[in-house]
Amino acid sequence: MLNRASMDSIQIFSLTLSGKGLEIAPHFTLGEFASHCGNDMVMVHPKLVTGLMALREWAGVPVTINSSFRTPLHNSHVGGAAKSKHRLGQAADVTVENKTPSEVAAWAEGMGWGGVGRYDNFTHLDVSGEGRRWDNRSNPSL
C-alpha cells in the first residue's frame, strides 16, 4: 500500500546543488519533480517515487510527470487546492502513453494510493491519507 506517507520522510533537494538530471530512481530525474515556477527547492516523498516506479512497471512505458512539487505561489497560480499534496512533494499529475486517465486511476485505486483524481488529460496521484477519490473530467461518462 502506498498511503499514509509521513511528513518526516520528505526529501528536500536543491536544483542548483543536485542538478535537474539527478536520477531520483530508475527512469525519474529530479527535474521532473521540480516546481514549474523556477524555484530551486524540490520536495519529493520517497513513497511517491516508489509508486511512480510501480506505475511505470505496470504500464510498460514511460510515465510523464506533468506536475509534482509546487511552491505555494505556483500552486495558487494554477488553482491548486489550499492544502494540495503537491506542496509537500507527495503528489504528481501524470500521463501514461496508451493509457487513459481512468485506466491509470483504476490501477492506482487497486494499489492503494491515498489520493486518486481523474481529469480529462491526466491522473492525479498522491501518497497522503487514505481512499480519497474524485472525478474532475468534463464528461465523466467516458
Image (spheres, rainbow, N blue to C red):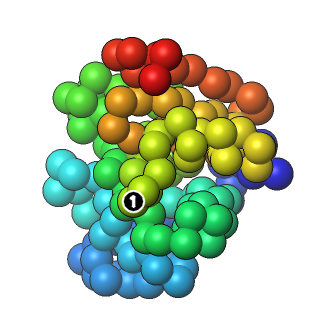
39 lies left or right of 64: left
> Which of the pair 129/125 is nearer the observer?
125
- Tell me where residue 40 appears, x and y as whole percent: 26, 63
Q: Residue furthest right?
A: 1
List the residue tagged with mark 1. 97
| Residue occupying the point 56% across, 46% down | 104
Pick whichever, 19 or 122, lies toward us: 122
Q: In front: 52, or 17?
A: 52
| Image location of residue 95, percent across then percent down | 40, 51
Secondary structure beneath label 1: loop
Q: Position of residue 56 (x, y in %)?
A: 55, 68
Q: Decide if residue 6 is in sight here.
A: no
Quarter of the rendering containing residue 17: bottom left
- The residue under label 1 is which amino acid type? Glu
Which residue: 67% across, 25% down? 132
Percent position (x, y) of residue 85?
52, 37
Q: Is residue 75 visible?
A: yes
> Looking at the image, which residue is at 46% across and 80% down?
27
Q: Residues within 10 Å of mark 1 (few under 14, many from 20)?
A: few
Q: Is residue 88 left or right of residue 46?
A: left
Above or below for 59 versus 8:
below
Number of numbered markers? 1
